[in-house]
Amino acid sequence: MERPDLIIIGAGVTGLATAKMALEEGAERKILVLEKSAGLGGRLATRRSPPAIFDHGAQSYPVMSSGSWHAFWKRPGRIDEWTDAEGVRVGTSRAGMTDLAKHLAQDLEVLKNTKVIRLTRTPSGWKVFSETGDSWETPRVLLTAPVPQALELLKGSQIPYPAGLSQLVYDPALVILLGLDSSPAVTTPFIRPKQPPLLSVTDQEQKKVSGTAAWTVVFDPEFSTRHFETDEVKVKTLALQEIRKQYPDLNIRDAQLKKWRYSRPSRIWPESAQAIEGYPGLVLAGDAFGGNGIDGALQSARTAVSLLF
């Protein structure tokens, strides 16, 4: 690839959407996305555990606030619309939420398994260094990783940033994926449990993601914080006890634990994206800037494009 006009660090919703929008505004632009993991989408995450399939991060996106992105994702037979527990009209992907990220990434240059460890200034912009020793030069860099990870990169690169960014913290989430022997009698794919520590339940079969009975159960921040570092076997035992208190008739076949250290920002930055003063072409973005969820990540991407070009 020729010298990119922009390097985006992180292939979550904000990173991929920023790349897509930047190319729509300037088809001649060259954009490179670097992602440290083996997958795309960040919290647009789907786990296949035959015969069950689970979305275990974001379960949906708001149709109205997503606007043109809903039209972009809504391909025949791929997207369903539902009303969630709060009465909001949402969209879900039958192929799993990861499919939305894959659709975003079409025609983009994305390097996976590429962890960025340092940034340095150059006369014409920036040089980006990866853990494996590769490097790239570019006039613009966008950081879309969770804020604590982005700040670690800035610290390691000796780049100062607004002190308030250190106050942006995230709630963790412990998630239990339940394979069930039979489908529970529920009328909606999205369930709001009556009592803590259960935060949400999603019926993946009703959501048309899984071809067999499967639930994704998310625990609230208090329970998740208290048990995040607890032994996995013990956590699963405690979590199943809490699930059975509210749903004693579930026929559970198997249970898997998923941990999200940066599940949801508990504080939101007042700007939708943040340029680093004194360091032209360096911007931070993500759902801690635009607001919680996929719509917040998309709003942050819009602002990032305007700051970068």
Image (spheres, grey):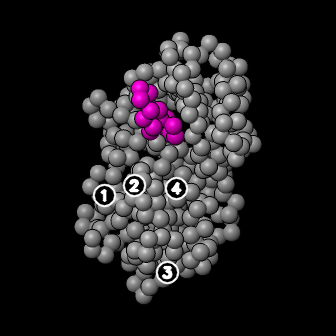
Quadrant location, the C terminus: bottom left
Mark nearer the N terminus (3 vs 2) = 2
Q: Is residue 79 magenta?
A: no
Left/right of residue 303 with respect to residue 164 in the rendered view: left
Q: Nearer the viewer, mark 3 or mark 2?
A: 3
Question: Camera-side residue: 69 or 206?
Answer: 206
**In the rendered image, which residue does mark 1 sit on?**
108
**In the rendered image, which residue does mark 3 sit on?**
120
Question: What is the secondary structure assignment of the residue under circle 1?
Answer: loop
Question: Camera-side residue: 13 or 118?
Answer: 118
Measuring from the top left, give residue 184's x and y in whole percent: 53, 14
Q: Which residues are magenta?
A: 46-64
Tags 2 and 1 in contact by the CB under 8 Å rule?
yes
Considering every residue shown, the one lying at the far bottom of the view is 123
Quadrant location, the N terminus: bottom left
Question: What is the secondary structure assignment of the residue under circle 4?
Answer: loop
Mark nearer the N terminus (1 vs 3) = 1
Query: Gap in Å between the C-alphas at discs 4 and 3?
Result: 22 Å
Give the class, few, some or many, for how many residues have Cα within 10 Å of label 2's Cα (few <14, many ≥20).
Answer: many
Query: Gap in Å between the C-alphas at discs 3 and 2?
Result: 23 Å
**In the rendered image, which residue does mark 2 sit on?**
16
Q: Amino acid at mark 1?
A: Leu
Image quarter of residue 194: top right
Image quarter of residue 231: top right
